[in-house]
Amino acid sequence: MNLFLNNLAEGLASTWKLLSDTSNFLSRVRLLERYEGELTEMRNQLYRYRKNPETVRRVREQVVALRRALRLEGHDLRLGSKDLVLEGFRHDDAMGEGFRRLVLGIAADDIVALAGDLNHIELAEMLESRLRDRKGRRPTAVGLHFLWYRWRNQVLVLSGAASEPAQAFEELKAYFADNKEFLLRKLAHL
């Protein structure tokens, strides 16, 4: 079903949009340098021959083939124009800026999250209760983080909450540096 939806979305998007989303994605996951020459050539072809349907079709096929190859490598291109940033600490007045509370649990092989309007301690208790209720899928050694989140256009902003120890936030930053795409994929639903 995912393959069908990906193909449908790619079929409806303009070639320029597909190329732009692909470039944004590659930039975010630090792979742009590997494909920069190829993307530049596609962009030049589209610009020079934008009124030639055959050239536009050929470039589109190249972009779709590149996206297919990236998916086979395990990348989630649905997140093409989305990004994730960590932005310091915030207090309860963050709600006035449009932020919501989030408890994030990071295990060796999974990420679990619960967002809501309750305070961070209550959200953490609810998340831990849900993890206990899972049958056979409970991640081991979950480290909890108390955060604030909000979307600014296509950028998911995460900030530490006042109840998040500075050392724990530093650990989150280290995790973020190596796992940004995975973290964004797990939190894109927020």
Image (cartoon, rainbow, N blue to C red):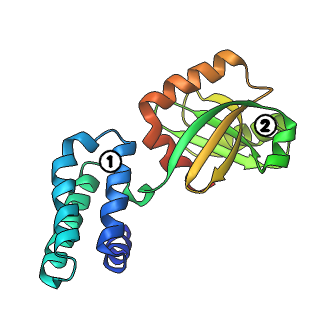
Q: Residue at x 50, y 27 (%)?
A: 175
Task: From the top left corner, tell me how far across and down residue 20 is, in percent.
Answer: 35, 60
Task: From the top left corner, tell me how far across and down residue 38 is, in percent.
Answer: 16, 53
Q: Quadrant of the C terminus?
A: bottom right
Q: Is residue 47 left or right of residue 124?
A: left
Foreground residue among 178 and 42: 42
Q: Is residue 143 above or below residue 84?
A: above
Foreground residue among 107 and 80: 80
Determine the CA span between mark 2 and mark 1. Answer: 37 Å
Q: Which mark is residue 109?
A: none
Foreground residue among 21 and 102: 21
Q: Nearer the viewer, mark 2 or mark 1?
A: 1
Q: Quadrant of residue 106?
A: top right
Q: Amino acid at mark 1?
A: Leu
Q: How many labels, in total? A: 2
Q: Name the element at disc 1.
A: helix
For mark 1, what is the residue?
A: 26
For mark 2, what is the residue?
A: 125
Q: Is residue 110 above or below residue 78?
A: above
Which of disc 1 and disc 2 is earlier in sequence? 1
* Residues tagged 2 and 1 counted as in contact (Cβ below 8 A): no
Q: Is residue 15 left or right of residue 37?
A: right
Q: Name the element at disc 2.
A: helix
- For the question of whether residue 93 can be seen, the reply is yes
Crowd class of label 1 (few under 14; some 14 to 19; many from 20; radius 10 Å): many
Q: Amino acid at mark 2?
A: Glu
Q: Residue at x 65, y 20 (%)?
A: 168
Q: Residue at x 83, y 33 (%)?
A: 91
Q: Is residue 123 left or right of residue 82?
A: right
Task: From the top left corner, tell me how far across and down residue 108 is, in percent.
Answer: 48, 29
